[in-house]
Image (cartoon, rainbow, N blue to C red):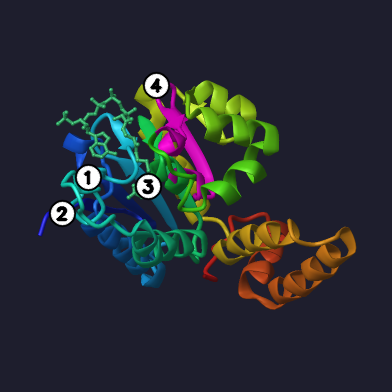
Amino acid sequence: SEQTILIEQHGAVRLLRLNRPEALNAFTTGMLGQLRQALEAAATDVDTRCVLITGAGRAFSAGQDLADPHVAPSREAGAPPKDIGHLLDHFYIPLALRLRSMPVPVVAAVNGVAAGAGASVALGCDLVLAGESASFIQAFSKIGLIPDCGGTWLLPRLVGRAKALELALLGDKLKAADAERLGLISRVLPDAELMEAALATAQKLAAMPTRALVETRIAMDEALKFDFETALKREAVLQSQMGFAYDYLEGAVAFLDKRKPQFRDR
Ligand code: T3D
């Protein structure tokens, strides 16, 4: 079957390239399944310590493939409507959960437009870098849908309710520089430097204490539900686990010995 996700290994970094450039990497059900499988394989590969996701061609991803026969509404009179809920239950929800719970940090290198669920996938990553010609479009409202694949959860947390609703209701194109200014993404880079910088960032993360990085993501996501004191206590539970782990011993001893640490927990 069509290879819609290209996989490259760069040391401890697993690079996943969304690969349907002729349709701006729009997601078919087959592609959603392959992306989830590729994430699963990266999660279970002990030598992979960071995942980097980018798009082939001029786009990151245009979101759901609106021509996919599994979901495209039939034009025939009297044809039954397609069940989008089924698509979400079987493809987007498992994908979003897999992405958000990766045992290694995940970086997105947004090389062009990220629209609809394509934007949700990018924004679901831990660090989002973008080329200056990249853009983000909450395309859902324009076709009568609501943000999905985590969009309603991610957007207000990233930029606050006012901007989240502005982006989701109007569905206008947001340039990468404006996305950075709003705090929607971490950093904009010149297009020519994006991949090199993203790979260097991923390599840097891969050499860091993976488990501590992942627990940081988990603790921050959880803390959004907690009051301050509950968050303090949760930090103490997680930190005590970190304190017993190899990487803390290695990190602290390497610091005192003035040498580079070799982390290995995952
Ligand atoms: O079933 C469900 O819908 C539920 C799931 C929902 C999740 C979602 O993601 S909903 C949102 C779906 N995405 C969109 O609505 C975005 C649609 N695309 C666009 O608005 C534009 O393509 C872009 C703004 C992203 C880029 O515009 P532009 O002018 O740079 O490129 P283009 O000419 O529009 O697109 C180039 C080709 O890609 C074109 O094909 P062609 O004419 O060369 O054969 C276009 O049809 C194709 N393409 C782009 N987006 C999609 C797509 N084909 C299928 N599905 C797409 N989403």
Front residue of 246/175: it is 175
Quadrant of the image where one finds ligand 1: top left
Magenta-tinted stretch: 122-142
Which residue is depicted at the point 63% across and 28% down? 182
Q: Is residue 28 left or right of residue 45?
A: left
Q: Amino acid at mark 4?
A: Ser
- The N terminus appears in which quarter of the rendering? bottom left
Front residue of 145/65: it is 145
Which residue is depicted at the point 78% across and 69% down? 234
Q: Mark 1 or mark 3: which comes first in sequence?
A: 1
The label on residue 39 is none
For label 4, the residue is: 133
Task: Calculate the distance from the C-alpha at mark 2 to the C-alpha at mark 1.
Answer: 7 Å
Q: Mark 2 or mark 1: which comes first in sequence?
A: 2
Q: Is residue 249 left or right of residue 151?
A: right
For label 3, the residue is: 53
Residue 54 picture location, percent across and down: 34, 42
Residue 256 colored magenta?
no
Which residue is depicted at the point 66% across and 58% down? 221
Task: Calculate the distance from the C-alpha at mark 4 to the C-alpha at mark 2.
Answer: 26 Å
The label on residue 19 is 1
